[in-house]
Image (cartoon, grey):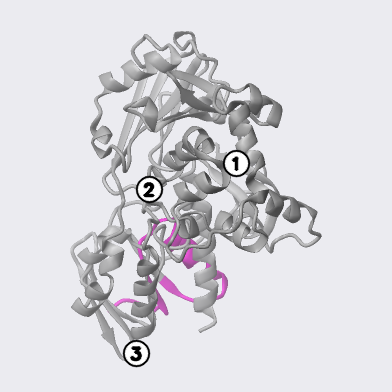
Amino acid sequence: MENRATTAILGAGITGLSIAHSLTNSAQSCHVFERSDRVGGAIQSTLENGYLAEDGPNSLLLKDTRVAELFDQIGLNGTKIQDTRPDAHNRFIVNQGTPCQLPTSPLRMLRSPLFGLSGLLRIAKEPFISRYKSKHEESFANFVRRRLGNNMLENGAAPFVSGIYAGDPESLSIRHAFPRLWAIENNHRSILMGALAMRKTKHAPPHRLSPTRTISFHSGLSELPQALARNLPQNTLKLNTKISAIEPCDGGWQISWTDLRGEQKSAHYQKLVITTPHHAISTLPLPHEIIQQLAPVAAIEAPPVTSLVLGFKRQQVAHPLNGFGMLIKSSENSPLLGVLFSSSMFEGRAPEGHVTLTCMMGGTHHPEYAENSDQIVLAELNKLLGITAAPTFRHRTHWQHAIPQYNLGYQKVLNALSLCEKSHAGLHFAGSYRGGISVTDCIINGLTLGKHLSKR
């Protein structure tokens, strides 16, 4: 039998680590089980020959005081935080084979080949559009098309959805995938009027941090889960473990596992939190009844996505790379979803005189593109950015189940999770498939759940 702890957490990704941090801050004991030999889940950074590559997320949006407080608690404050470079506020959309800078003002929108006068006039009608009245759930695409017009959907909103979800705007639920937009329409009728009303209000939303910052860390985002792990009490983390049994027992949960040395161990916990990826839950040795209840969770679509990080000599790239990156419209029929200008986003992503590009491919529309060869990617980079030379650095990461899609009908997923938790005392589920896919969402959801569990 293992030393006792109150809570068992399955998965040492950013959600599981945030829950563990919140519990230990409240003097609650927990064990975090992780099958691999490292923490962080998809948040992994690789430093090689002066190049820094991210396997998963490339940045974090610091917009919540709870996240800022967490950074203070684990020693990631002050100079350890890395803000984006000044040019990183620029975004590009590929239009007719050319990266076009996304306009930041009505005048620039008027001159932009992306929108023009007709697009601007259609956007100006938005305050006069009524709320959605149908009983059927609305997709993101229909929401944007209805409120802002098809021009905005095709040339602005849809490419950004590809960048965030690698998904299909026609399938994603506006209510669940973009709950803030959905709430603005429901509370203020108009997006533009709602934005103005929120700027005028004297009462800022709770925990809002202003100004919002897009950040990373000097050694990459993996500094975050590593810092969380270092700050946990000794023997909290159990890496290289394989769970062999999960059984309800005495109002709690009996967990059995095999450790790195092949030793079989077991312990009883009052609470069990499962933070493993949604597609892996069915592989856990859970009671058959729970697996059946979670069928809607297992059915969540999560398309394959590949990240290919390439380094080049600066003089070998014709484009100035003066921005965050470029997203590509579906009408361009490109083998890429988009390209992040990684070394333009943050300092230290490439050696002096070199640049780093992160090429994203795959997704819901073209999952087969996740298998693109380097030659296909280089040909597209030559076409879009004027790169003719061979790369000086290469780092490829493939995610077979990359990003959970909050598609139409997603409420069934939430209902299944709630029902399962209510019918099994002490059982909880958390992860990017619930409450938001971003790193920030996962942190906040983890901290909130940990605080809730510490009070029970």
**Label 2: few (<14), some or many (≥20) within 10 Å?**
some
Cα gap from disc 2 to disc 3, whole angstroms? 33 Å
Let me know if residue 219 is in the magenta part: no
Marks 2 and 3, the one that precedes in the sequence: 2
Q: Is residue 43 above or below residue 255?
A: above
In the rendering, at what x and y percent does residue 281 appear?
Answer: 27, 65
* Secondary structure of residue under mark 2: loop
Q: Is residue 23 visible?
A: no
Quadrant holding the N terminus: bottom left
Three-letter amino acid code of the residue under disc 1: Thr
Which residue range is magenta in the image? 1-30
Left or right of 137: which side holds 402? left
Let me know if residue 12 is in the magenta part: yes
Q: Which residue is mark 2?
A: 42
In the rendering, at what x and y percent does residue 222 appear?
Answer: 46, 45
Left or right of 24: which side holds 404? left
Q: Which residue is mark 3?
A: 251
Left or right of 232: which side holds 301? left
Numbered badge on residue 135: none
Say which of marks 1 and 3 sits in front. 1
